[in-house]
């Protein structure tokens, strides 16, 4: 049996530097007053009650750059969108840097946590996988990497209930490490990821019985989007990935290729020939390269990123420019382009996105000064707020926008305010400043959080 296994990705040496979390760091530039927009409140209510959308327009080129004021008001918007957590001191510090340096600080290389073996999470009193992620988000110096990791986990979906909890934990750690890299790096990694291979049943795909699950989702959900391939393409891609499986060594799953299970016949994918007789493993990589060379892949990813970071209905012209940036560079390049774009700071873009439960919980806990997941948070996330970060509902990922806010779930969010902001007997006091101003425009205390804008980024 021929077995080929990839080596673990190295941890970057340039572990991140602080973006200035200490209170009072940097002078707040008086370029623009902090202001509460009554129009934004009306828009927030309209979005929640009617699901209204807005469209960005004008100044959409790749070289377009925001030239307006960059004070606490703008920095808070940037911090909320990029990281989904923050406080006034951090917004002031970003504002003192100026726009470009602030964006660079937020997009610094992700802080990589120490990875634990499965036995760390097993046994009575052991940490919960969900809480471990929340703690990382609350404590890290690179919180923007955590929101981006949540995006990639919702894009390259796996469910821990099927793949195993540690496999999903390991996959999330790899997504974090590569979150700002090129889309090529991410796609290559996920194609070899044991959690993905198990989740979409490719570990059982052989020349006699090719499994089409990975092939279909690779094109429909991960790269091209629905309608840009044929059923024949799915069959051919499935054949190219036969033999891509997992091995079990040292109590862990690893990617493995089994040549005896591979279909060696010629294949045609999207009109391109795939037939590597020298090394059949590379047929899978050739398929990935075909998808990566297709402009539709970058349009699909650009639109999805813009809906996550910018607006639920991005202008198609902006999607095209974003696709060009992404194809020619990295995810970091894409986000830097977006976070410095004039339309990102337009009134129409502010408070236009609905927080997912994970973002809502992390942001509120951070605003309440808590830097560790309180007991019971894992239960709140999965049982009451309806987002288990380790188990998306299906391969298409979580809902978005107003779909997060049916009446029952909105009521649970309001109940969560008391859970997140109170300190019970025996619980340690907040270890950070209590400050709700970045979590929600105009918030002064927990009572403010019942307003509709508390649900919005």
Image: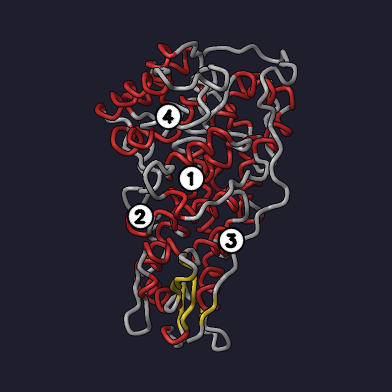
Q: Is residue 177 left or right of residue 17?
A: left
Residue 359 picture location, percent across and down: 45, 33
**40 above or below 248?**
above
Q: Is residue 28 left or right of residue 361?
A: right
**Mark 3 or mark 2, which is nearer the start of the sequence?**
3
Instruction: Classify mark 4: residues with Cα within 10 Å, few (<14), some (14-19) or many (20+).
Output: some
In contact (CB < 8 Å): disc 2 and disc 1 = no
Depth check: give the residue in front, 334 or 202.
Answer: 202
Q: Which residue is mark 1?
A: 151
Depth check: give the residue in front, 425 or 92.
Answer: 425
Instruction: Classify mark 1: residues with Cα within 10 Å, few (<14), some (14-19) or many (20+).
Output: some
Rendered residue at 32%/30% (across/down): 405
Determine whether the residue tagged by mark 1 lies in a helix, strand or loop. helix
Q: Is the image coloured rainbow, by chain, by secondary structure, or in one colour?
A: secondary structure
- Camera sees residue 19: yes
**Mark 3 or mark 4, which is nearer the start of the sequence?**
3
Residue 250 picture location, percent across and down: 49, 68
- Label at residue 374: 4
**Mark 1 or mark 2, which is nearer the start of the sequence?**
1
Q: Which residue is mark 2?
A: 395
Residue 432 picture location, percent across and down: 57, 22
Q: Is residue 337 left or right of residue 267?
A: right
Residue 21 picture location, percent across and down: 65, 26
Q: Give the distance between the C-alpha atoms of the residues marked 1 and 3, in whole angstroms.
A: 16 Å
Q: Give the distance between the C-alpha atoms of the residues marked 1 and 4, in whole angstroms.
A: 24 Å
Q: Quadrant of residue 204?
A: bottom left
Give the foreground label among 4 and 2: 4
**384 above or below 261?**
above
Instruction: Classify mark 3: residues with Cα within 10 Å, few (<14), some (14-19) or many (20+).
Output: some
Determine whether the residue tagged by mark 4 lies in a helix, strand or loop. loop
């Amino acid at each position: 049996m021929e077995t080929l296994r990839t080596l673990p990705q190295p941890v970057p040496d340039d572990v991140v530097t602080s973006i200035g979390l200490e209170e009072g760091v940097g002078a707040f530039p008086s370029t623009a007053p902090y202001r509460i927009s009554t129009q934004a409140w009306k828009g927030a209510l309209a979005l929640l009650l009617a699901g209204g959308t807005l469209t960005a327009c004008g100044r959409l080129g790749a070289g377009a750059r925001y030239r307006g004021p960059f004070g606490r008001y703008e920095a808070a918007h940037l911090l909320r969108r990029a990281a989904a957590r923050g406080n006034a001191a951090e917004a002031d510090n970003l504002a003192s840097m100026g726009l470009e340096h602030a964006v660079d600080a937020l997009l610094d290389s992700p802080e990589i946590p120490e990875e634990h073996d499965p036995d760390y999470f097993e046994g009575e009193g052991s940490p919960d996988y969900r809480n471990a992620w929340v703690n990382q988000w609350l404590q890290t110096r690179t919180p923007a990497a955590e929101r981006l990791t949540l995006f990639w986990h919702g894009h390259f979906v796996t469910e821990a209930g099927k793949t195993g909890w540690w496999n999903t934990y390991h996959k999330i750690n790899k997504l974090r490490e590569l979150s700002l890299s090129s889309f090529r790096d991410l796609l290559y990694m996920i194609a070899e990821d044991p959690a993905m291979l198990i989740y979409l049943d490719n570990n059982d795909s052989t020349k006699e019985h090719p499994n089409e699950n990975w092939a279909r989702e690779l094109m429909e959900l991960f790269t091209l989007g629905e309608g840009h391939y044929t059923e024949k393409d799915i069959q051919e891609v499935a054949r190219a990935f036969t033999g891509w499986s997992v091995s079990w060594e040292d109590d862990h799953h690893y990617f493995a290729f089994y040549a005896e299970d591979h279909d060696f016949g010629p294949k045609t994918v999207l009109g391109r020939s795939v037939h590597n007789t020298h090394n059949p493993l590379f047929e899978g990589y050739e398929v990935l390269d075909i998808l990566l060379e297709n402009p539709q892949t970058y349009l699909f990813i650009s639109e999805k990123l813009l809906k996550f970071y910018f607006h639920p209905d991005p202008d198609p012209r902006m999607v095209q420019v974003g696709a060009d940036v992404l194809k020619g560079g990295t995810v970091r390049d894409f986000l830097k382009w977006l976070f410095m774009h004039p339309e990102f700071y337009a009134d129409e873009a502010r408070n236009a996105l609905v927080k997912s439960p994970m973002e809502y919980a992390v942001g509120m806990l951070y605003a309440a000064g808590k830097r560790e997941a309180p007991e019971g948070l894992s239960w709140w996330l999965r049982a009451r707020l309806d987002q288990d970060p380790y188990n998306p509902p299906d391969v298409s990922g979580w809902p978005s926008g107003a779909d997060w806010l049916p009446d029952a779930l909105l009521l649970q969010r309001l109940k969560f305010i008391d859970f997140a902001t109170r300190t019970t007997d025996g619980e340690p006091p907040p270890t950070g400043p209590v400050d709700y101003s970045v979590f929600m425009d105009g918030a002064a205390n927990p009572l403010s959080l019942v307003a509709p804008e508390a649900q919005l980024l």
